[in-house]
Amino acid sequence: MTSQNMRVYHRYLGFFLAGIMAIYAISGIVMIFRNTDFLKKEKIKTSTLPVETPLEEVGKTLRIRDFKIEKTEGDLVYFQNGTYNTKTGEATLKVKELPAALEKLTKMHKATTKSPLFFLNIFFGISLLFFVISAFWMFIPSSDIFKKGLYFTAAGIVLTIIMLMF
């Protein structure tokens, strides 16, 4: 009876999560390339900072990692991919962003407790864990398929451990 119930739950939860799994797969693949320009479009963003913002604060305010001033000419401060006018407070920055739809997918994938999407991530993680456990109720433990499945499970665990070592 438990075996039959697990099969039913596994089947219908699998159908329900098929779309979510596809979206997570796509966003996961896109995130692998997040430190490259793959699929990104260049945009110009302008911001107005408080006038006379200390130069050491400009990078933090604009959320630029490894902010370094390249040169200063009069009121204009040049940094990688942008400028800051110390008199007007106007900052212009060239950024590369994913298309809006892909950006939303990656934000979903990276959701933290500060985002309402984290509930979806928790539900999805628990569902995947259920798939792992319920898969062992799909076949009779004494069957050849089940025994081969255990070998594949062990191989997956070993491969993961090897990959984590490097």
Image (cartoon, grey):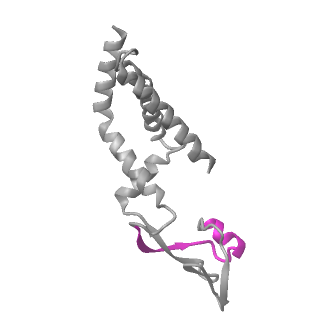
Residue 136 is situated, as x and y percent measured from the top left of the image, at: 41, 21
Q: Is residue 113 visible?
A: no
Magenta stretch containing residue 49, yes or no?
yes
Q: Is residue 124 left or right of residue 18?
A: right
Residue nearest the viewer, comparing 109 with 64: 109
Q: Quadrant of residue 64?
A: bottom right
Q: Position of residue 115 (x, y in %)?
A: 50, 43
The quarter holding residue 148 reads top left
Q: Which residues are magenta?
A: 40-61
Please indicate whether residue 126 sits to the left or right of residue 91 in the image.
left
Name the quadrant containing residue 19.
Answer: top left
- 63 and 36: which one is in front? 36
Spot the residue most to the top: 1
Residue 146 point in image, percent of width and height:
39, 22
For image coordinates 33% across by 21% down, the residue present is 9
Q: Residue furthest bottom?
A: 74
Q: Is residue 113 left or right of residue 129?
A: right
